[in-house]
Image (cartoon, grey):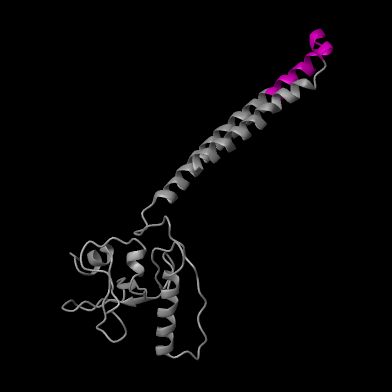
């Protein structure tokens, strides 16, 4: 799709710019051109045509190069690896509930909302998350047991997200080791986390 759009844009622009010399030539009087009336007039006409040809060639090169770079950028955006599956996924943003909701009431509300989403026709699975993917969410300082505390000059923080039991699995995130969250991972169980390869390399394989 991106290549077709870029090709069409370059084609239309080339036709428009290329027709300028032809349109200019149609304005000349054929009788005067045959008689060769005036050397200065012919010189100015030749100079004008040459200028139009140079401008046309320059614009054509710039447009083709720009269209090619745009097509490559769009192609990279369409095929880049986000770490999860994009096709068939729908993100819906939900505003925060009223502030007077207690934590038990919020937990019950979220479970009911997820259950209703999963019962919708043609929905294979749903999940809830505090943040949408690729958003600038909160980060926390990471301190690894058995390692010295990070210095102030070091970047030792990582972003985190709070999700429901089936959110990561339904998002199509592939696990290399470990397991997905389950319904047993709740507010009364021990805290668990799923981390990325970049997280492991940064905090557990340094040096």
Q: How would you classify the magenta stretch by its main secondary structure?
A: helix
32 in relation to 156, above or below? above
Task: Write the residue at 69% across / 23% down.
Answer: 49
Residue 84, how many percent across, how many down? 35, 59
Picture quarter with the C terminus:
bottom left
Task: Write the residue at 32% across / 65% down.
Answer: 169
145 in relation to 102, above or below? above
Please say whether residue 130 is visible from this viewpoint. no
Residue at the limit of the structure toward the left, as seen here: 146
Along the line of sight, the residue nearer the viewer: 92 or 132? 92
Task: Identify the image quadrant of residue 88.
Answer: bottom left
Please say whether residue 106 is visible from this viewpoint. yes
Along the line of sight, the residue nearer the viewer: 100 or 201? 100
Taking the magenta stretch, the answer to whether it contains residue 34 is: yes
Task: Identify the image quadrant of residue 82.
Answer: bottom left
Residue 2, how many percent across, how many down? 50, 43
84 in relation to 139, above or below? above
Residue 35, how many percent across, how many down? 82, 8
From the viewer's perspective, tell me whether residue 198 is left or right of residue 94: left
From the viewer's perspective, tell me whether residue 183 is left or right of residue 98: left
Taking the magenta stretch, the answer to whether it contains residue 13 is: no
Image: magenta residue range = 30-49
Along the line of sight, the residue nearer the viewer: 32 or 10? 10
């Amino acid at each position: 799709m991106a290549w077709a759009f870029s090709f069409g844009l370059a084609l239309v622009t080339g036709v428009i710019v290329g027709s300028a010399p032809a349109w200019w030539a149609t304005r000349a009087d054929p009788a005067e051109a045959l008689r060769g009336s005036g050397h200065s007039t012919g010189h100015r006409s030749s100079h004008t045509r040459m200028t139009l040809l140079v401008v046309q060639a320059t614009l054509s090169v710039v447009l083709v190069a720009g269209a090619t770079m745009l097509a490559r950028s769009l192609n990279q955006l369409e095929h880049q690896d986000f770490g999860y599956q994009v096709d068939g996924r729908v993100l819906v943003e939900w505003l925060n509930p009223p502030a007077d909701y207690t934590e038990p009431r919020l937990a019950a509300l979220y479970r009911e909302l997820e259950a209703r989403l999963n019962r919708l026709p043609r929905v294979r699975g749903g999940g809830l998350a505090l943040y949408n993917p690729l958003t600038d969410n909160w980060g926390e300082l990471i301190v690894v047991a058995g390692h010295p505390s990070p210095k102030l000059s070091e970047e030792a923080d990582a972003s985190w997200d709070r999700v429901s039991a089936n959110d990561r699995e339904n998002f199509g995130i592939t696990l290399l080791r470990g397991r997905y969250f389950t319904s047993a991972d709740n507010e009364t169980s021990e805290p668990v986390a799923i981390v990325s390869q970049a997280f492991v390399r940064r905090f557990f394989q340094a040096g």
